Amino acid sequence: MGNEEFWEYRITRDRIELKEPIIECDMKGVCLVHEPVEEEVIRVLNREGEDGWELVELAYHQGELVCIWKKPKEVII
């Protein structure tokens, strides 16, 4: 068990302001509406980054910015 790194994960959901909504639909009829205000997204990224969290994935879903974060887990040996 040399230099193994363990991760702690968390999911956050933040209601964010939108610009003029954009609606996109594919050939199957699946539609997406999105256009978050950039400053709102940056605010969330900076808030979590200040606490040591690294962004793994983000999505916009039903008015919320949904983010998955990770940071190294402190392992006490």
Image (spheres, rainbow, N blue to C red):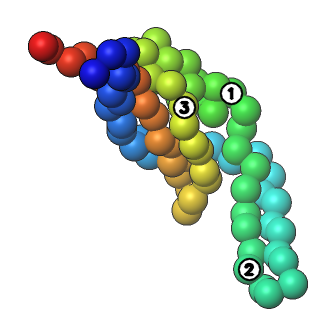
Q: Dot 1 lies on which element?
A: helix
- The Cα–Cα distance between marks 2 and 3, rounded to whole angstroms, is 27 Å
Q: Is residue 10 above or below residue 43?
A: below
Left or right for 7, reference 24: left
Q: Are marks 2 and 3 in contact (CB under 8 Å)?
A: no
Q: Which residue is mark 3?
A: 55
Disc 2 residue type? Val
Name the N-terminal-most of marks 1 and 2. 2
Q: Which residue is mark 2?
A: 30
Report which quarter residue 52 is drawn in: top left
- The Cα–Cα distance between marks 1 and 3, rounded to whole angstroms, is 17 Å
Q: Nearer the viewer, residue 22 or 25?
A: 25
Quadrant of the image for the C terminus?
Answer: top left
Q: Dot 2 lies on which element?
A: loop
The residue positioned 80% from the left and 87% from the top of the image is 28
Mark yes or no: residue 63 visible. Answer: yes
Q: Dot 3 lies on which element?
A: strand
Mark yes or no: residue 16 visible. Answer: no
- The Cα–Cα distance between marks 1 and 2, rounded to whole angstroms, is 28 Å
Q: Nearer the viewer, residue 70 or 62?
A: 70
Point out the residue furthest to the front here.
1
The residue positioned 82% from the left and 60% from the top of the image is 22
Disc 1 residue type? Glu
Of discs 1 and 3, which sits in the foreground? Answer: 3
Which percent across, then down, holds residue 66? 51, 48
Q: Which residue is mark 1?
A: 39
Q: Is residue 10 above or below residue 25?
A: above
The residue positioned 28% from the left and 21% from the top of the image is 1
Disc 3 residue type? Leu
What count of labels does the image hold?
3
